[in-house]
Image (cartoon, coloured by chain):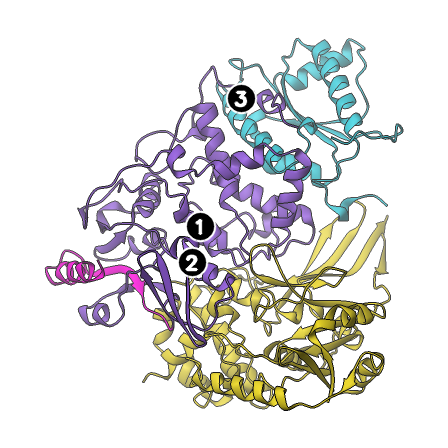
Chain colours: A yellow, B cyan, C purple
Amino acid sequence: MLRIPVAKSDELFAAIASQQTLYLPADRKDGQAEYRKWEEGVKLSSRLNTVRSAKDFFFPQTENLAEFRMEGKKIEVIDIRKESEDFVIFGVRACDARSFTILDKVYLVDPVDTFYQTRREHGTVVTMACTRPAETCFCQTFGIDPTEPEGDVSCWSDGSYYYFRANTDKGQKFLDSLSSLLEDGDTAALEETKAKTKEILSKLPLAKVSTENFGGDKLNEYFRSEKWGELSESCLGCGTCTFVCPTCQCYDIRDFDTGHGIQRFRCWDSCMYSDFTKMAHGNPRLTQLERFRQRFMHKLVYFPANNNGEFGCVGCGRCLSKCPISMNIVKVMKALEEK
Amino acid sequence: MQVNENTNFEPVIVAFCCNWCSYAGADLSGTNRLNYPTNVKIIRVPCSCRVNPMFILRAFQRGADGVILCGCHPGDCHYTSGNYFTRRRITLLYSMLDFLGIERDRTRLEWVSAAEGAKFAATMQEFTDAVRKLGPNRRLEDLRCRKQ
Amino acid sequence: MQEAMINKAKQLLADGTVNRVMGWKRGEFVYDITPAVFETAEEIDADFVCDDFTAANVSKYLVKESRKEGKILAFLKPCDTYSFNQLVKEHRIVRENVYVVGIPGGPKLDAEKIKAKGITGILCVKNENGTLKIDTLYGEETMPYYEAILGKCETCKSRKHVVYDELIGEEGEVITAEDSGRFDMVEKLENMTAQERYDFWREQLSKCIRCNACRNVCPACTCENCVFDNPASGISNKAAADSFEENMFHIIRAFHVAGRCTDCGECSRVCPQNIPLHLLNRKFIKDINAFYGEYQAGEDTTSRAPLNNYDKDDCEPSIVHERGVE
């Protein structure tokens, strides 16, 4: 398998960055990680994952859609789209990589979201296999193997080498462009690392969480469950879970009056918010219970109902560590399953 | 603090003036044919106390380079005590803006009575000059609102 | 402690003093604790918890809970009692419907700080003579206890319960600003240049994802409809589309709670991006103390709030412009 010594990672990153913009998880002063543009001196984070997910690259929090200028009674619509540049996201975990598949099911079906599509076409995803999963991880629940991540290129590390395998044409092209740096090598050490990781994976506290009691056919059973009251009771109605979630894909479209025109933009929205899907007659979900239920029903029931059984969650564990009141999808699943 | 080298820069100054004293003061400076810079855009408010901190921030958002708030002298408020509340509120707001690193000379509060036309004109001249020296507001502007 | 609380709760439920108990519920791990209302002794026995990780301030839940039928028991740490008192003062909590039992405060621990050390796979955390022994999926790890203390507890302002019906443990004392050092960081920032302060806050506030966790957890933020959620306000926004909006949200939020913020530190505790939001509130508190005399929100239920009050001899805003450091 193609590989490069970890010690030469700066060389590797410099080679990638010389061709296209490279983003990778880097440590912040506060000890958390975030995706940052690579430049001389930026080091790949050792944290398991970033606070914000990698969906930002394809579905950013805010995005301008169009501009309007008015003169008298004439309205001019201006397409503000710029030429997109190719970019590489390096070090995406298996969970985030799967989230792109889920977002694709929303944005690349008819009517195709061309903003999203353009970004997907220009982005090369290089994933990184996990070696130290955390207690909050439960990607296995959704059939993800963090030691075999998807993406255009899969990458593994055994501590001394990075190993690469291309999964798509785009990925192959990417590896070809780095061929002078990569060498063919033996993978014995890597297999050992993988085996160790697999052992840890089987011991994870959430390893037993299962989706077998969830899916599109559970609507009536769970929608009317009495558990929602108790579960949503302490929910603050903030959007933390939604915004750190790699698969949440709802947005709102708004106009901003710049004083010399109108800017139409979209921004992430959260079903936890009181003004989510507010219409002329008001809001269809009047209390936090309904909003809370919506978020989890969407991930566990509605989404699989519309997408051949695929769940709207990848088990990255971000909401487990970030929810201000520590209420999360695992607790919801366990509570709903209790008869 | 950076000093603007572009001498052609003309700042936009927003002046919130209370209806009873400062706005009348501005009027008086006009009837007395006193000059004050055309940079100053006056917004009349019923009382200086009406000025929500948001108004000041939004003035900066939408292109103001300096914001000055004018009201009746303490003790002379048409509504007895409005400007006393203003004083506390605005002191804290300006202090907070300073804390966030916004140049402190972009904000000002001045008490101007209906009889002080000359003071109004002089204050506006002085404030405009001070902001002109600072250059355009970059730290508290909304890039979307910048005129291309 | 937990046992004494459980006994107290069961006793008060049994004798009919209260019909519900506001407390904390055990989670999947050691640290993921959820504020919860318990209605029966069985529920309490099963899930009630009070330990190093029960940092959440439950006062705000009492706004809603105190309007329900019957009386609720609330276990409040010293810092929580300030928030509670402030909400009583603002007529948000119906005092008669809450039975307050004061419990000793922190310091509480912050799982994020443990994780920031690179410790992962946390299964169990124990404090042994100032050293945290952390049982993980990758073996046992240790770190100094004080390095894992929650930010808000590091600069604790008071061990005194300002309101209670009953106390478990002893009455504590207020801690002076000198001893707590809670204004030290504000002072440090004040002594920087404007450019340095600007850079500091840009770095911090640009991390904001506008999840509104700070606002929604804040016991002083109890508006029925926030100006930032109200489409008719002209400034509602769901995301910061420009750096200006990042600044505006936090300035306005801090300003709206100025004089009412008790410095409970929940905003910074819940921020998923670790923005030190409490520094904005503390700046206001420090200024209020300096300009208008010492004031601690929540200390009592009768005094006038500093921004609802004035003195004819108050300082002029020019005090800001005449400061030494640029």
Left or right? Give the position of C185 relative to B27: left
Task: Determine which quarter of the picture holds residue A130.
Answer: bottom right
SS at badge 3: helix
State whether residue A128 appears in this view: yes
Q: Amino acid at mark 2?
A: Asp
SS at badge 1: helix
Q: Is residue C113 above or below residue A160?
A: above
**Residue at 12 percent of width and 60 percent of height:** C11
Are discs 2 and 1 located on one and the same chain?
Answer: yes
Q: Tell me the tag on residue A22.
A: none
Q: Amino acid at mark 1?
A: Gly
Residue C7 highlighted magenta (yes or no):
yes
Quarter of the image with the C terminus of chain A is: bottom left
Please state the horizontal and vertical placement of residue B60, each as a whole percent of the image: 70, 37
Left or right? Give the position of A71 relative to C87: right
Task: Determine which quarter of the picture holds residue A95.
Answer: bottom right
Q: Is residue A188 above or below residue C51?
A: below
Quarter of the image with the N terminus of chain A is: bottom right
Q: What residue is disc 2 on?
A: C110
Q: Amino acid at mark 3?
A: Asn
- Residues at circles 3 and 2 in contact by the CB criterion of under 8 Å: no
Are discs 1 and 3 located on one and the same chain?
Answer: no
- Residues at circles 2 and 1 in contact by the CB criterion of under 8 Å: yes
Report the span colored magenta.
C1-28
